[in-house]
Image: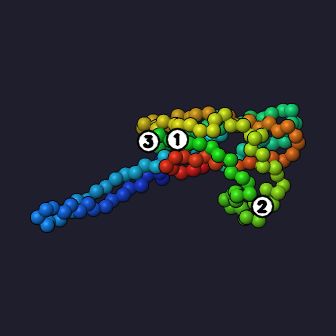
């Protein structure tokens, strides 16, 4: 099923019109409201859905790593997005207890500046009845000193769902 269907909301209400002679006429109104959202996927050639985490693995500090993600807009409205850092102390991943999230935060260093995103905000045009276009987003990791790094970034969609 088309993922964009989940961003649509059908609203039905009655409009009451009062006339000067005191009579009231009711007319049904219906609207289909589309809320913008975007999808993230890995750039691995298979277009797999984004799992919510990017792991750069273990490597030497003098060897920066990069991952390519794809952004797409499966809706029929423009998507205006921005990417913001969310301090790990405030983030509890789905399916994880607050206690385990706190333990994980204590085991890692939250330094968002070591994760360089190719873009921090942008707009994606609607699909206009076609397959959504893929827009690349590069994510680079480069730490100056050894350690375990973990940062959370939230993609916010104006007037829509955040990822």
- Residue located at (80% from left, 46% from top): 149
Does residue 3 appear anywhere in the picture?
A: no
Q: Is residue 76 left or right of residue 86?
A: left
Horizontally, residue 17 falls left or right of residue 78, namely left
Q: Residue furthest front?
A: 20
Which label lies toward us, 1 or 3?
Answer: 1
Where disc 1 sits, the SS reads strand
Q: Position of residue 39 (x, y in %)?
A: 57, 44
Taking depth in this image into account, of 13 and 39 the one nearest to the observer is 13
Left or right position of 115 against 38: right
**Going 78% across and 61% down the picture, which residue do you hit?**
102
Q: Is residue 113 left or right of residue 46?
A: right
C-alpha separation, residue under disc 1 versus residue under disc 3 = 13 Å
Residue 37 placed where, x, y %? 52, 46
Q: CA distance from mark 2 to mark 3?
A: 40 Å
The residue that mark 3 highlights is: 76
Q: Crowding at label 2, few (<14), some or many (≥20) Cα neighbours within 10 Å?
A: some
Question: Residues under labels 2 and 1: Cα distance?
Answer: 32 Å
Residue indicated by mark 1: 80
Q: Residues within 10 Å of mark 3 (few under 14, many from 20)?
A: some
Q: Nearer the viewer, residue 17 or 100?
A: 17
- Of the numbered discs 2 and 3, the one sitting upstream in the chain is 3
Give the labeled residue for mark 2: 102
Of pointers 2 and 1, the one earlier in the residue sequence: 1
Observer-side mark, 2 or 3, equals: 2
């Amino acid at each position: 099923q088309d993922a964009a269907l989940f961003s649509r909301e059908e609203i039905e209400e009655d409009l009451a019109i009062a006339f000067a002679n005191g009579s009231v006429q009711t007319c049904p109104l219906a609207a289909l409201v589309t809320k913008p959202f975007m999808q993230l996927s890995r750039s691995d050639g298979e277009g797999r859905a984004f799992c919510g985490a990017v792991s750069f693995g273990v490597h030497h500090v003098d060897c920066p790593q990069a991952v390519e993600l794809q952004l797409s807009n499966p809706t029929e409205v423009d998507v205006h997005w921005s990417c913001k850092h969310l301090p790990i102390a405030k983030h509890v991943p789905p399916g994880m207890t607050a206690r385990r999230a706190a333990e994980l935060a204590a085991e890692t260093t939250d330094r968002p500046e070591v994760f360089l995103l190719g873009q921090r905000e942008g707009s994606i045009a609607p699909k206009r009845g076609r397959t959504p276009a893929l827009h690349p987003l590069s994510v680079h990791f480069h730490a100056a000193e050894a350690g375990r790094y973990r940062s959370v970034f939230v993609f916010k969609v104006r007037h829509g769902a955040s990822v």
